[in-house]
Amino acid sequence: MLVLVVAHLGVAALVPLLAPRLGRAAWAVAALPPLATLVWAFTRAGRVLDGEPQHESLAWVPALGLRLDVRLDPLSLLMVLIVSGIGALVLAYGAYYYRGRDAGREAGWLLAFAGVMLGLVIADHLLLLYTFWELTTVVSFLLIAGRRPDTERRRAAEQALLTTVLGGLTMLLGLIMLGRAGDSYRLSELIADPPRGGYVPVALVLILVGAFTKSAQMPFHSWLPVAMVAPTPVSAYLHAAAMVKAGVYLVARLAPGFADVAPWRLLVLTAGLTTMVLGAWRALREKDLKRLLAWGTISELGMLIALLGAGTRTAAVAGAVMLLAHALFKSSLFMVTGVIDHQAGTRDLRRLSRLGARLPATCAVAVLAAASMAGLPPLLGFIGEEARYDAFLHGGVAGVPWTPLALFAGSVLTVALSARYLWGAFAAKPGLPDTPARRPAAAFLAPAAVPAALGAALGLLPGVTDGLTGPYADAYQPPAGDKPYHLALWHGFTWVLGLSVLTLLLGLAMHLGRRGMAAFRSSLPRLPDAQGGYRASIRGLGAFAISFTRVTQVGSLPFYLTVVLATVVLLSFVTLLSGASPTGHVDLWRSWTELAPAAIVLGAALAATMIRHRLAAVLLTGAVGYGVACLFVARDALDLALTQFLVESLTLVVVVLVLRRLPPRFTPESPSARGRWVRAAVALATGTLVAVFALVATQARRDGSDAPDYARHLAETGSENAVNAIIVDFRALDTLGEISVLLVTAIGVVSLVRVWGGEDAEPGQTAPVTGPQEPPVYARDQPPERSPAARWDQPRQHWLPGVAERPGAERSVAMEVLTRVLFPSILVFSVFLLFFGHYGPGGGFAGGLVAGQAFVLRYLVGGRTDLGLVAPIDPGIVAGGGLVLAAGTGLVPLAFGGEPLSATTWLHVSTSLSFDIGVYVLVVGVILKLLSAAEGARA
């Protein structure tokens, strides 16, 4: 089963590449995975329907108990048949619908959606289900938004994304609560032995919120009609058969175990039947055929939520039948609408007239599908309608007496909207000329005809339909003394049959009296506008954000720092003081050698707060860092000391480069006396907090130190340096997160500099220079070429290839010669630190910093052009490549059930070396990126 999901995603990635060569045949390639899944599902159907579910499990992170659990049971089998069958038909339909260069992209994303939807319906783990749930949201956003800058489509995609993501996050909280309450995240185990009491009702409410947003239940429904701006194949698949069914599927999956838990039944019946009635009522106002179908879909999704969430066997049978019937007739009607739009150029029913005569085959398909939607015998919709009436009349649903009336009203309105669709699309309208339309190709109409024909066939074969849908309903027990309900075309003259006939008659009467109904509808108060509410909430959120930003973002860095530090102090100090107090002996220092660095740190920090010159303040801050490094040396923490020295040196250089754009002194305006006292108090409180925290942390340890464990397992890493082993072996995932933050920070710095100082220039991009356009190139054994045009007081030789752009007054021969000699030596030393880190002080981070110092030196002496000659690669590619290498080394084993940084048995080199190299490359790329930002600030 997992192989099928991977096959969908793999082929989806290839289809856009194949489309330019294969043309329309690329859609046939895209349809192969869904077709293969459909065939596979039919081969497993016999055993699954006989009560033998298929289960697969793949270890993901065994240490955390995470596994990829998938399961095929009667409900998931039904959904797999719908997802794969309709998916294959829509992909075949898209071959004739789409034109132009975007066709391959659309085919790929439709196939990718089929893959993630397949994963959702077979997932047997709550977190795996949520992962696929959100993937469907992301892919649907891309399908609705499209590639071209269409503002209306982008807004619709954003609304769908915001609504479903917020619901999904709410659902995630409920899933976690439910998993913890049941002591298992396996869906099958939770349904077999459902937890009770505690916070289970709260968890179920949160889960239902997610299901309601995904399946467009009121009041979360407004995103679905807006999404009709998407192409018709997207609507036919996502908004008829797949995505909107995700919430319905989740309700159907959980109902056997939790339908009796309050307030489950009340919520699903109220939300579902209210949505059914109001959605169908709203559909009767629509003039656009797709929007009419969209509101009809909202109505029918409400009916499915009510049936599948009711928690009785008859309701489950009716829900399963209508789940299948709705997928068939609604996907067919959406595709027919696309054919009409494609061939006639419009889908506005006010402009369509006598289309049935011009497109008779299309009209026949639409009549067959709409008749099933209306519940006409002998179609599948009729069987489902009788089953749902039976479920709410005497199928065991108790406690909600108004449900039969709501179901009846919704069914009548569904008949009316079915008639409105056929009349609007194909009937002759007085005063309108015949709509010109070309007859579609048979291959274009065939995908719409297949589900309509299946709806008729399954209606004529109720035994087959009962065998497909009944096993899911067997999870419920019928009411005591009643026989299990079975599907049939004829149950005799019953109240259910009478209601079905009355439903058809009243629905047709509503359509025939549509003018009077329109007048009656206009006399009623308008329902609350959910779309207007969404827009108002977005505007209100934006206004609140602006107001909040205006108050909090005052443009003062000291103010921001004061607020942050004061918040830390207020939130932490009480907790620390109320906790364990330090006990026992505290060593303030181990030797007298620590006093001198401590004095340097304190003196430099105090002087930095009083100095008014920016450069002097930066140098004093650097002295604080160097003093801390000396303290590390005194404590024998050589790795920390080396890193601290290198970071301070690099920071000093970068900050000094930035200082070129700032005044030499701080702003002459001094804060008020009150402001100075507030800042001093916050600074003193912060320092005290850090000191108290250090004392409490060292004395309040409950468990023993992890150091002996690290030392005991050090030999397993092949390392003699415990610090490096912790960074790249024991805690490699932590390091991966830290270097990711480092890269993101560098990108943020560069972005700020671009806004502030103009576009930055990458080291590999040389700017116009005043000197020679092509600096002299010479071999190693040849002396540097002389510059005959140079003045007597300017250097006459180019010791570095790129210094020709720099004026003579900014050049130093001594520094050029020294840089030429030291640059390769520093790089070699950085590589030595990289490899030596496993055995002594060093590692990828320290080595990268040393290499960065070499490039900084080259930049300071030779300028941007010279740096571009020795580092001609885009710094972003360098940094990103390092992150990819480190992440690949650390995370790829997880995909195969291994552990992070698993050793390679056939390679006698520590796998963590690759991780360290990734860190090294990333640090070098970040430094080059910062140098480019400094150049941008200088420009």
Image (cartoon, helix red, strand yellow):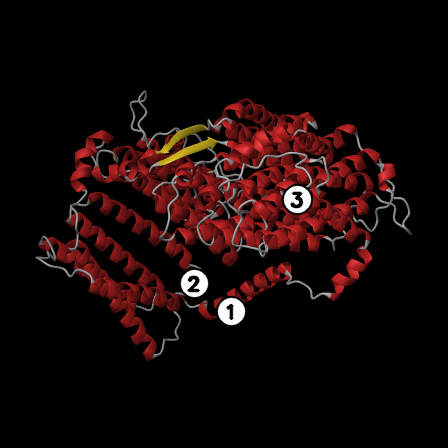
Q: Secondary structure at mark 1?
A: helix
Q: Secondary structure at mark 2?
A: loop
Where on the picture, by quarter, is residue 78? Answer: top right
Q: Which labelled disc corresponds to residue 547?
A: 1
- The residue under the point 59% across, 32% down is 466
Question: In the image, residue 731 lies at what x, y percent?
Answer: 29, 40
Question: In the image, residue 738 lies at what x, y percent?
Answer: 35, 45
Residue marked by disc 2: 662
Q: CA distance from mark 1 to mark 3?
A: 59 Å
Residue type, numbered disc 2 = Leu
Whether label 2 touches label 1, CB < 8 Å:
no
Q: Which class describes the residues within 10 Å of circle 2: few (<14), some (14-19), or many (20+)?
A: few
Above or below: residue 845 compared with residue 224 = above
- The residue under the point 74% across, 41% down is 370
Q: Earlier in the sequence, mark 3 or mark 2?
A: 3
Question: In the image, residue 398 lies at what x, y percent?
Answer: 52, 51
Residue type, numbered disc 3 = Val
Query: Mark 1 or mark 3, which is nearer to you?
Result: 3
Camera-side residue: 804 or 375? Answer: 375
Asked whether residue 221 appears in the rendered view, the answer is no
Whether label 3 touches label 2, CB < 8 Å:
no
Camera-side residue: 155 or 532? Answer: 532
Q: Which labelled disc corresponds to residue 496?
A: 3
Q: CA distance from mark 2 to mark 1?
A: 30 Å
Q: Is residue 389 left or right of residue 426?
A: left
- The residue under the point 61% across, 44% down is 390
Q: Is residue 15 left or right of residue 656?
A: right
Q: Earlier in the sequence, mark 2 or mark 1?
A: 1
Asked whether residue 343 appears in the rendered view, the answer is yes
Q: CA distance from mark 3 to mark 2?
A: 84 Å
Q: Secondary structure at mark 3?
A: helix
